[in-house]
Image (cartoon, rainbow, N blue to C red):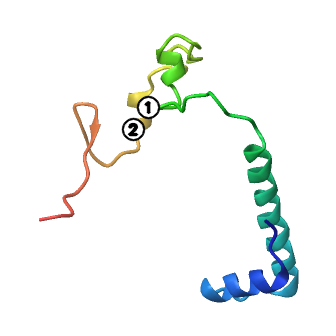
């Protein structure tokens, strides 16, 4: 599928966009590039491959391992230094004025 300049003008009109001729040409190239990617994906033979219920389902079922980094603190705790400029602090928390009654 490929869009022509008339298609772009019609879409821009429906979206209430005022596109210059340069913007219209650039948009047509980008949208047609997207359609080209979709056509490449459609060309892949997926016969006999079951769809996954979730993208990480393969990792959960043992087919692939999730590549998650360890949950480690990368910076030291500087709470006191960061709260020195705060107008009000109580037990390590910033105090803010009530805005909803």
Mark 1 vs 2: CB contact within 8 A: yes
Q: In this view, does 22 lie above or below 92?
A: below
Where is residue 57 drawn, in percent x and y? 48, 24
Determine if residue 19 is in view. Answer: no
Work out how far the residue at label 1 is from the one at label 2, CA to CA, in angstroms: 5 Å
**Residue at 52% from the left image edge and 10% from the top image edge:** 62
**Residue at 55% from the left image edge and 20% from the top image edge:** 74
Where is residue 11 drawn, in percent x and y? 68, 82
Q: How crowded is mark 2: few (under 14 residues within 10 Å), some or many (20 or more)?
A: few
Where is residue 73 drawn, in percent x and y? 49, 18
Q: Name the residue under label 2.
A: 84
Q: In this view, does 63 lie above or below 10?
A: above
Q: Is residue 70 above or below residue 44?
A: above
Q: Nearer the viewer, residue 58 or 26?
A: 58
Residue at disc 1, secondary structure: helix
Split into 4 quadrants, where in the image is the C terminus?
bottom left
Q: In this view, does 1 lie to the left or right of 59?
A: right
Residue at disc 2, secondary structure: loop
Q: In this view, does 95 lie to the left or right of 32?
A: left
Give the farthest residue toward the front.
Answer: 48
Q: Which of 60 and 100 is in front in this view?
A: 60
Res 22 → quadrant: bottom right
Q: Name the residue under label 1.
A: 81
Determine if residue 84 is in view. Answer: yes
Q: Is residue 70 left or right of residue 97?
A: right
Q: In this view, does 60 lie to the left or right of 28?
A: left
Q: Which of 91 and 52 is in front in this view?
A: 52
**Which mark, by number, is residue 6?**
none
Q: Residues within 10 Å of mark 1 (few under 14, many from 20)?
A: few
**Residue at 28% from the left image edge and 31% from the top image edge:** 92
Split into 4 quadrants, where in the image is the N terminus?
bottom right
């Amino acid at each position: 599928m490929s869009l022509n300049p008339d298609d772009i003008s019609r879409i821009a009109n429906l979206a209430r966009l005022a596109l210059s001729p340069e913007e219209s040409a650039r948009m047509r190239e980008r949208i047609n590039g997207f359609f080209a990617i979709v056509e490449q994906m459609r060309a892949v033979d997926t016969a006999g491959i079951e769809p996954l219920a979730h993208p990480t389902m393969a990792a959960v079922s043992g087919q692939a391992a999730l590549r998650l980094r360890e949950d480690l603190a990368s910076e030291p705790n500087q709470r006191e230094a960061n709260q020195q400029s705060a107008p009000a602090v109580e037990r390590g928390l910033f105090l803010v004025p009530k805005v909803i009654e």
